Amino acid sequence: MNIKIARADILPALNLVSGVVEKRQTLPILANLYFNLVDGKLTLVGTDLEIEISETIAEVIGDNGAFTVSSRKILDITRMLPENAIISLKHESDKVIISSGRSRYTLKTLATDGFPRIEDNTWEERFKINQLSLKTLLSKTSFSMAVQDVRYYLNGILLELTQNCLRAIATDGHRLAQADVDISLDIKEGRQLIVPRKAIVEINRFLEGADDQEIVVEISKNHLKLTKGGTILITKLIDGKFPEFKDVLETKLNITVIINRVEFIEATKRAAVLVTDRFQGVKLALEPGVMRITANNPEQEEAVEELEIDYTSEKIESGYNASYLVDAARAVSTENIEFHLQSANGLCIVKQPEDSRSIWLVMPMRI
């Protein structure tokens, strides 16, 4: 089997499909990428058994055939070749010979019949979504996912589907982010699915490129599939029950403050210079005309930042994780942000002005 392809054509595909391959594998074959050439179409596949990414490159010169080869090695070799290089791959027995110009590499291969593929042809729902819409939806929520939480169902994003809406919700138990976009879906009743954290990271990489591209989304009981041109991502879903959260978001908050987003982010970051890794709390105080952000540390040091606001009610003060406040503010795309509060030591909800479709909640912390 022989393949001849330009470095510029194969390198983006190698970068994408190699991203899912873990550095440490339970099976040797999982360190490899799967190459399959059929009638001029070369398909590259990477997998970790939970997520599979494949990309098909058209108009490739070569003979039909398949092999697997080390993901790390072929990617490193291709990266280091000159930009205008033409690469030849020749598969013989249990080796593949990679040559370009005066460079030549011989790598070991493993049998293709041992390469695991995610098989699921029972797709129950199917809809299309603009790439920018999906990218924005994830960027507004993904930072609130839990990291290696024992409550495994929090280590991902909940997607809620209705006939005309796709909603994303993420929470780590201390904060929550929710956003939604319009879709057209012919279903009788809504459904929920939890997409794991690593899959969300890979989906964000998958969504790189022209924002006006159309993504085809397919869903089964246990899998989610995204298709963009010749690129396909399939991931297993988390089998679990996402916690109820709607009552928290519907809490009546009687105090609303509008403030410049950039000014708030910069002031909070400056105050947080004095917080420690173990204790990231800052005090957020409102009093007539002023929002005061205060940080203290065990060395009895203090930082105080003041921002001018339109506020005339009584003084209230609550403690929050500084990073959570900054993350929520960064997710807002407008010049100003709305803070919704209830009383001292109460939860904080951040919104975009005139936007009822995005909401960020931060729970208070004792300081």
Image (tube, rainbow, N blue to C red):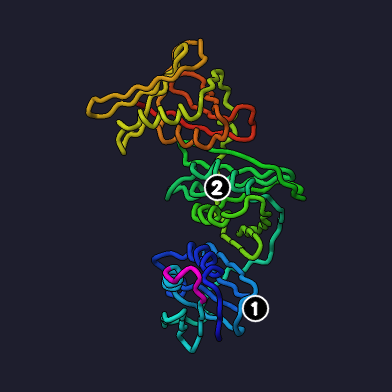
Mark yes or no: residue 8 visible.
yes
Closer mark to the observer between disc 1 and disc 2? 1
Coordinates of residue 89 in the picture (x, y in percent): 51, 81
Query: Which of these two is toward me, 320 or 98?
Result: 98
Check the image and report above or below for 237 versus 144: below
Q: Position of residue 366 (x, y in %)?
A: 37, 27
The image position of residue 118, as x and y in percent, is 58, 68
Q: Is residue 46 visible?
A: no
The outermost residue toward the left is 299
The crowding category of the residue bearing disc 2, from other C-alpha atoms within 10 Å (few below 14, some 14 to 19, many at least 20), is many
Q: Residue sitting at 42 percent across and 69 percent down?
A: 80
Q: Residue at x 54, y 66 (%)?
A: 13
Earlier-in-chain disc, 1 versus 2: 1
The residue shown at (42%, 30%) is 266
Task: Give the residue at the far bottom of this rendering.
Answer: 93
Residue 40 image label: 1
Q: Is residue 5 magenta?
A: no
**Labelled disc at residue 157:** 2
User: Is the residue under label 2 in contact with that under label 1 (CB below 8 Å)?
Assistant: no
Query: Mark 2 is on which residue type?
Result: Ile
Q: Position of residue 257 (x, y in %)?
A: 53, 20
Magenta range is 80-86
